[in-house]
Amino acid sequence: MEPLKDPLNDRIVSHLPLPPQRPLPIDILIKPFSNLPCWKFLKDHLTQEGKLTKSSVIFLISQARFIFESESNIIELFDPVTIVGDLHGQFYDLLKIIEIGGNPEDTKYLFLGDYVDRGHFSIEIILLMYALKINFPKTFFMLRGNHETRQMTSHHNFRKEVLYKYDLETYELIMESFDAMPLACVINGKFLGVHGGISGKLNGLDDILKINRFVEPPHDGLYCDLLWSDPVDNTSGDLPENFVHNETRSCSCVYGLKAAKTFLKRNGLISIIRAHEVEMEGYKMYKWNGKQKFPTVTTIFSAPNYCGTYKNKGAVLRLDDSTINILQISRSPEPFVLPSQQNLFTWSIPFIIDRTLSMLNFILEHNDENENENIPSEDNNYIEQMFEEMHDHRKATLASKIRHASKIALKVKEMKEKNHLTHINRENNDYDDRNIEELEIEKAIEIFEKMKDRDKENEKRPQV
Ligand SMILES: [Mn+2]
């Protein structure tokens, strides 16, 4: 599609390609003589920050939802398969994943959820992945993550992103499509794929099949645990009980070796492959049974430099002949977006108010006689007259009002900064995405741990 016009040819960053001129209409999206979206064309359009017409969006969401609805709670498949963890709105990294993980036309894919929130390009991820799902319903699979819910997308930024780029109806349709996503996957009859993990309420795979998944996931129980639970973070896998409360998430449970072993044995499985937790290397193998043994649990996390701050690698897992291979990726460059999709004017208002008020304050606090020399005498007379007419207490009132306003402006600024902690704070970022490779490993781990600690609150389930 034609790019936007630039009649004056005065763009400051001229090397950046212009976005497409119009939203992609459905008759161009759909391949001729078929009912399938042209995913490669859509991919290029979205990469250039193009939008879609409402009918194109509705087509993709409703067709994908229709396929999800036809799937069982548990998908059954066989390797070779490329398994992908959390993406969190990092569309430009998804493009890289498709590039290295294999062309979806001839590669089987399993995505473990958490497509949306945190990053700025979640809707682009959903639209492209839905187009792939429609094209390859039997080889491209998407499970539900804990962020594919009304609660998480309202608490984080996906809802805002959809309202900004599309509208409320689009958001609600996407939520209904999330309700239809399957919950788990069994590969080769040996591996359980799921977003979070197992549960005290999970005995057999039958228990997962019995769930009515077509709802907003509840706050506790098996459905919640599949999406929210975590493995215990130690080398032995020991826990005081089989399942303990998950403090980090404010809901669900933590499971260890004993619980995992019991569950796997009972169901003839050997290993759990899950996502849900950011890892420095993009993956983590829990070899609780001993270093030589097959990992009981593997975490796969596919959003490199998560939130623009973690400095972690992203990874995808390639399962072939029941053997695990890991492919790592670094962050791909993406268009710069201000936090919460603000425009430059909204973003700068607190700073402008702040500056203006400090200027006013300065003027009021300084009454050096000599400074009046440069002011034309008529003006000077006028100002003096005005101030003489003004009683002292009025001057004081005015000054105090300005000081109060200044305090308010500072509060506004603080609030804004606090709101944006969950997003990229580029100013305080010592290293940009380009030189992660050059970071010393100790420094990278230090930054990763610091960011993880600072971001703790956001990994919790919000309390309602
Ligand atoms: Mn998650």
Image: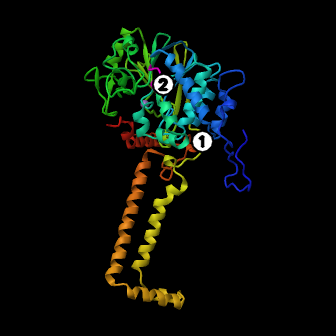
- Range of the magenta residues? 177-183
- Rendered location of residue 285, percent (x, y): 44, 24
Badge nearest the viewer, 2 or 1: 2
Q: Quadrant of the N terminus?
A: top right
Residue 302 vertical position relative to residue 242 in the rendered view, above or below: below
Q: Tell which of 65 and 242 is nearer to you.
A: 65
- Rendered location of residue 201, percent (x, y): 31, 18
Judging from the image, what secondary structure is the residue with disc 2 in?
Answer: loop
Mark 1 Cα-neighbour bin, 10 Å: few <14, some 14–19, many ≥20: few
Residue 59 vertical position relative to residue 355 in the rendered view, above or below: above
Q: Residue at x 41, y 8 (%)?
A: 268
Location of ligand 1 given as a quarter of the image: top left
Q: How is the image coloured?
A: rainbow
Q: Tell which of 462 and 261 is nearer to you.
A: 462
Q: Amino acid at mark 1?
A: Pro
- Rendered location of residue 149, percent (x, y): 43, 31
Query: How many numbered circles are shown?
Result: 2
Q: Amino acid at mark 2?
A: Leu
Q: Residue at x 67, y 52 (%)?
A: 13
Which badge, 2 or 1, is on the more N-terminal residue? 2
Seen in the image, is 101 located left or right of residue 448? right
**Label 2 to label 1: alpha-carbon separation:** 24 Å
Q: Quadrant of the C terminus?
A: top left
- Rendered location of residue 257, percent (x, y): 34, 19
Judging from the image, what secondary structure is the residue with disc 1 in?
Answer: loop
Task: Report if residue 432 is visible in the image.
Answer: yes
Residue 307 vertical position relative to residue 244 in the rendered view, above or below: below
The image quadrant of residue 408 is bottom left
Which numbered tag is attached to residue 333?
1
Task: Report if residue 329 is visible in the image.
Answer: no
Q: State the residue position of label 2.
A: 112
